[in-house]
Amino acid sequence: MKNYKKFGICPVCKSECKIDEDIVVCPRCGAPYHRECYNSIGQCMFEDKHSEEFSYAKYFEQNNAISNNKNNNINNVENKDRTDLKKCPNCFNKNPADALFCNSCGTPLSETYAKSTFKQIPFSPFFDKFFDINKDEIINDIKVSEFIQYVKGNFLYYIPIFKNIDKNNRSRFNFSAFLFSGVWFLYRKMYKIGITLTSLLILFSILSTFIEFSYSNEILISLLNKVGISNSSEITLDKYDLFLTNFYSLPIIQKILVFLPSIFKLLTFIIMLISGFIANKVYYKNCCSKIKKIKVLCKDDIKLYEEKINKFGGVNFSIIPFVSICYIIIEYLPRFLI
């Protein structure tokens, strides 16, 4: 039996006809078939072309050349696309090759451009060190580049802080966490502490508003009417003393109701203050824990590693409008209903 492998592949099953297989060859055009494939159709697939002196060998060579050209064109396009795309080191967004900044997060894509840009800005020595980040430096057995991948937005702020926490166990006051408290933790994907703090703040806000408009205001207005005060211009030292006397004579439960809104507001402020002081350390520990778990889970699978980093790291933008709407409803709706 001849080796018809040089003639190409079986036109029916599209696999090569090998020398050790039972092969049937069309005597007119030379098309090779596996016997089972030929029997399944009962004739040569190119029967209608035999009158045109059709040759399967030439047909196969022509098709093979066309296929190779197509593949080469596709590979060239793909290689060109890969060359033309520039990956952002911060958010991993793909940008055009001539882009100086990421069109997603604004990170400088050219190191020389980034350095020259920073040099032109009159930073103090503190800020010169602030932007000097060595991506291969190790913090708590984790590379700085891995922290950058996890933190994403605003990593220039957090990396120096993480270094200071690791070396000196000292942090900085986080004003974003102070102002937004639970929402900031939710934004940074620390959902347990974020939900806890947000729930407490919402509860304090609801109780404060409800007690203030349902009880406290009525008690205070009643006391002011008793001493003849209708506006601030009528307050005198004698009337103020009389007001205090009447207030001290109130039942203990009413005194508590008068002070409760202020107590809840004080508790809210304390939570905000604590959030500002602990935020960076909590976030640092969260980053270390999550990155180490992801590395153990993914091992050498880079694609899975990047997928998990993007899932658990970065920030949650969608939480901001949701919490803002909830806050507006909770804060202002009771004022219209009470």
Image (tube, rainbow, N blue to C red):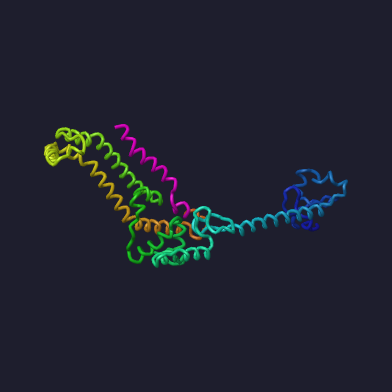
Residue 293: give x, y in percent of width and height: 42, 57
Residue 53: give x, y in percent of width and height: 87, 49
Residue 19 sits inside the magenta stretch? no
- Judging depth in this view, the residue of 100 and 67 nearest the camera is 100
Q: Does any portion of residue 305 appear in the rendered image?
A: no
> Along the horizontal axis of the image, is 81 left or right of 182?
right
- Judging depth in this view, the residue of 49 and 191 nearest the camera is 191
> Along the horizontal axis of the image, is 14 left or right of 115?
right
Task: Please identify the quadrant where the C terminus is shown.
Answer: top left
Q: Residue at x 15, y 40 (%)?
A: 236
Image: 142 above or below 266: below
The quarter holding residue 94 reads bottom right
Residue 158: give x, y in percent of width and height: 40, 59
Residue 34: give x, y in percent of width and height: 76, 50
> Along the horizontal axis of the image, is 138 left or right of 72?
left
Q: Residue at x 36, y 57 (%)?
A: 280
> Along the horizontal axis of the image, is 56 left or right of 248?
right
The quarter holding residue 172 reads bottom left
Q: Residue furthest top?
A: 337
Q: Label the magenta part by its dominant secondary structure.
A: helix
- Judging depth in this view, the residue of 6 and 212 nearest the camera is 212
Q: Which residues are magenta?
A: 309-338
Q: Does any portion of residue 280 appear in the rendered image?
A: yes
Task: Please identify the quadrant where the N terminus is shown.
Answer: bottom right
Q: Residue furthest front?
A: 233
Image: 171 above or below 224: below
Residue 320 sits inside the magenta stretch? yes
Q: Residue at x 19, y 36 (%)?
A: 220
Q: Residue at x 31, y 44 (%)?
A: 201
